[in-house]
Each structure stands twice: as structure tokens, then as C-alpha cells.
Image (cartoon, helix red, strand yellow):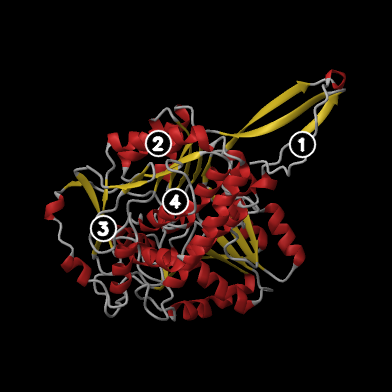
Amino acid sequence: MPCPRFPQLRHIRASAFSTSARANALSAAALPRAQKLSEGWKGTSATGGNTKNFIAGHFVESNSVEWIDVHDPSTQTVLTRVPQTTDTEFGQAVDAASHAFKSWSKTSILTRQKFVIELQHLLRKNADAIASSIVLEQGKTIADAHGDLLRGLQVVETAIGITSTLLSDKIEVSKDMDTYVRKVPLGVCASVAPFNFPAMIPLWTIPVAAVTGNTLVLKPSERDPGAAMIIAELCQQAGLPDGVLNVVHGGVPTVNAICDHPDIKAISFVGGDRAGKHIYERGTQNGKRVQANLGAKNHAILMPDANKNLALNSIIGAAFGAAGQRCMAISVALLVGEAQNWLPELIERASKLSVNGGFESGADLGPLISPAAKARVTGLISSAEDDGGKILLDGRNITVPGYPDGNFVGPTIIEAGTNMRCYQEEIFGPTLIVLRAETLDDALEIINSNRYGNGAAIFTQSGATARKFETDVNVGQIGVNVPIPVPLPMFSWSGNKGSVLGDIGFYGKSGINFYTQNKTITSLWRAEDAIGNRASVNMPTHH
């Protein structure tokens, strides 16, 4: 992700905020969903009300005098106001998490497992509400919003296996002497989530932290907190005790408070380079464990022997889906040899994508998150011309009927060089950079020279070519005829190079390791010292 610009906070009185005109500015497709969200959920609003803090099991109105407006990216309608959580409120959230940890960390693993079993059921039952919130606040199409939730739900489902994944090592090292390892929770942890996956990223952290016995302070993106607030309410319904999950809001002050609070033991972050480096450096200086996923520039190689239809459709979906606002989006296509002749057809197919509001039927991609994001993306597209590149498909001036104020940029394809700004920087918009290479070795050299290492893909029908690519490419997540090779959560996120800080990945076995620390015990209980006891015939329940 690109460096997020923390929002400017403004002083505003609640009495000065009117909701009716803003709500009516939503599209006909969006308005009833916004009204239903506002009526049905305690912590969020989509019709102009305030987003609340969630502290010690209660949705609490903030006393802040600093608020951030959340806009519908399709219309600029104000959906809700997000508080800059006050210092006092933040302290209350951490205190609640600290207090809850005393009992939650001692709760049986079967009780914690029961929580995630119930949570996955409730997430499925309320998927439409969460997806609607994502469309309204973030701008994704409704189908893509459901996908956002589903990828997070898969982490919840995998966390149900904690009774197996938390198993550890034990060996009898000498007669009657055992050495064994216990994986124990860290304590209060924190999660700082980005705007581009408002459901998936909170669900990367909440279930894994909870089943391992930790408590969590979550800061969703101040641009689209609605999905996280719904998830928090569902966690409560699923039986999570008060204080195990707390949700706070805001920009830099909240981030710094997370980095500095002595009771917070670990921080999980997904976002841009600047914020990620700041959190990693400040957090680790304060003795915290930090995992940070940063920016990316993901390449896909198209070999001449590839299945042409699969390759072109895969590239288009991975480059332009979610308006390019994915940290695993394919943003560079490397056309090798005769595959360069496929470029006109790639352009033609991309030009047929439908750009529209997220609730509109047939929409392939929606708007960017904000006017500032649109200005940044169009500026990087324009820089290609200044640097000598060719804009082969230009989406800068697209008009979307019915949405004159939306942050829309259409699919854009640029033929560029590796020295150009549009290649060097993560664009984070619906823009595909095309590079030409004569051989696979040339393409590999380009990828390996890039400072980022989240992922890369190759399209080929040759097993030998795929094996060479897998062996020689220096990125963490590799796709063979798969454009977005994000591992399912029985594995772990494994980006590398400049795309990550910290040495323990997200979810999977790495996630378990991130949220636990080892205690290694050596004990001696001599068998000859045993005292016989009468047997119990009751069924053991282990609760």
C-alpha cells in the first residue's frame, strides 16, 4: 500500500452536524442499505451519525472535539463522523484489555475455540451488512466486498483448529524427567488496519489473538471503520467477554499511543511504507513485537506458451479489481518474447470493464477511496508522459453517469521503463505498467531488482519454466498461473524485501507464533514417589 496520509482533524460541535441532506445525496441503490445499517448496528452509522468507540463491551460516544468525516467515495456524501479517540478513552480501552487478559488468558482452549466457531456462523449470517458497509465507505463493488469478508472469514475458520495448531513439543529427556514447551499469550496486543480491506485485516488479527489467549485493541482505518464496528458487535454476540476486544479510532495520536503504551506487547500493522516504518521503529524501540506489511509492486510474467485467454483475463482482474487498491494487485505485466503481441488484446479487454458505483449491477470496479487518492493516481499516470512512457489506455478523465462527484479512475495501461516514477512507486490505483522482456532471465532480473517483494506470478504451460521461476524469483508469494497468490490461512503471509518489517508473518503458523511466547519447562517427578489415589469414574470434561 502507498503511504496513507493521516487525515486532518477538525474541531466541530455535534449540534452543528445535520444528517438528512447528506443521506439523501446517496444513490437510490445505496440509500436503503445505509438506512438499514444505521438502524441495525450499535457502533456505526451510514446516515450521518457518529461512529462510537468500543470499550469494555460497550459502544461509547466519544468526548472528542476532533472528528473525521467519512465520505461515500461515489458521491462525497458524509456517512459518519469518526472521533479522534481521546487520551482518556484510549487509556480506558487498554485498561479494559489488561483487566480482561487476567481471566481470558486462563480460559480453557475449548472455550476460546467455541468463540470462533460461533463467530464464523455470525459472520456468514451478517455478510450482507458487512459488505454493504464496505461498499458505502470504501467504494468496492458488492461482489468484491463479499470477497473481502470471505478472505477474513477463512482465517476465523482456520482458527477453529487451535486445539491442534497450539500443540507443542514434549520429550522425556531422562528417567522421569520431561522437557516440554508451552505456548503462552503475550498480553494486550494492538492491530492497526488499512482502508483497503476493512473486514479482512481485522479478521487477520481478532481470531488469532483471541484463541491464543490475548486481548486486543483494534484501530480500524479512520476512512472506513464501519465493517470493524459490525465485527466487534458480532464478537460480543459470539460470547467474547467484555474487554477482550476494544476498538478505538483516529490518526497519528492514536497510532503513537499504541506504540508508546507500556501495557501493549505487540502490534500488527498493514498499510503504507511511511506509517509502517514509523510504527515498526517506534514500537520496537518501546520493546514491542511488531509485524508490518508495507508497500508492493507485484509483477506478472506472460510467457509465449501461456494459455492466452487465462493469462489476459487473470492480469486484468488482478490489476483493476478493487480499483487497484490491493497490496497484492498485479501492477506490472512483463511480456516475454512473442507474448508482446498480446498487448493490443490486453488493452481491448481492459477497456471493456465497467466502472460504476459499487451497488450498480455489472460494475467491475468502483471509485478510489478519496479525492486525494484520485489526485495522486492521476498524477502518477501523468508523470509517465513526462518520463517518456506511453499511455495506451487512459482512465484519467472517465465520466460515470449518475456519479459526477465520484473518485473514479478508469482502467489505465502504460508502457514504461523501470527508471520511470510510475514504475518505481506503488500507484495503488487501476493502473497497469507494461514492460517488455526478451527472455525469462531478463524478466526475472527486473523483478529481483525491484525493492518490493510481496508477490509475483508467471503464466506458462511449461513445468520447467515454472520451476525456474519459483526457484530464482526473489519475492515471498509466488503464483504459477495464479495472479494473486495470497496464501490461504492454513499457510502464512510471506512477503519479503521492502514489503515487510518484522520477522513473523500474519495468520497460519506464523500468526500463532506472533501472538504467543514459549515457556520451556524441565520437570522431574519420580515414579517411586507416587501416592496411590482412588480413581474417579466421572466423565472428564476438561473445562
Q: Amino acid at mark 4?
A: Gln
Q: Are marks 2 and 4 in contact (CB under 8 Å)?
A: no
Q: Compare residues 247 and 286 and report the one nearer the observer.
A: 247
Q: Which mark, residue 536?
A: 1
Q: Which mark, residue 96?
A: 2
Residue named by callout 4: 236
Q: Badge 1: few (under 14), some or many (20 or more) residues near its Cα, within 10 Å?
A: few
Disc 2 versus disc 4: distance between alpha carbons?
14 Å
Q: Are marks 3 and 1 in contact (CB under 8 Å)?
A: no
Write the residue at 61% across / 62% down.
457
Disc 1 versus disc 4: distance between alpha carbons?
37 Å
Residue named by callout 3: 80
Instruction: Give the foreground label among 3 and 1.
Output: 1
Q: Amino acid at mark 1?
A: Ser
Write the residue at 33% across / 51% down.
222
Disc 2 versus disc 3: distance between alpha carbons?
26 Å
Q: Position of residue 133 (x, y in %)?
A: 37, 64
Is residue 236 toward the left or the right of residue 212 in the image?
Answer: left
Residue 11 sits above or below residue 105 on the image: below
Instruction: Give SS at disc 3.
Output: strand
Q: Badge 2: few (under 14), some or many (20 or more) residues near its Cα, within 10 Å?
A: many
Q: Position of residue 62 (x, y in %)?
A: 25, 45
Disc 3 versus disc 1: distance between alpha carbons?
59 Å
Residue at the extreme left:
16
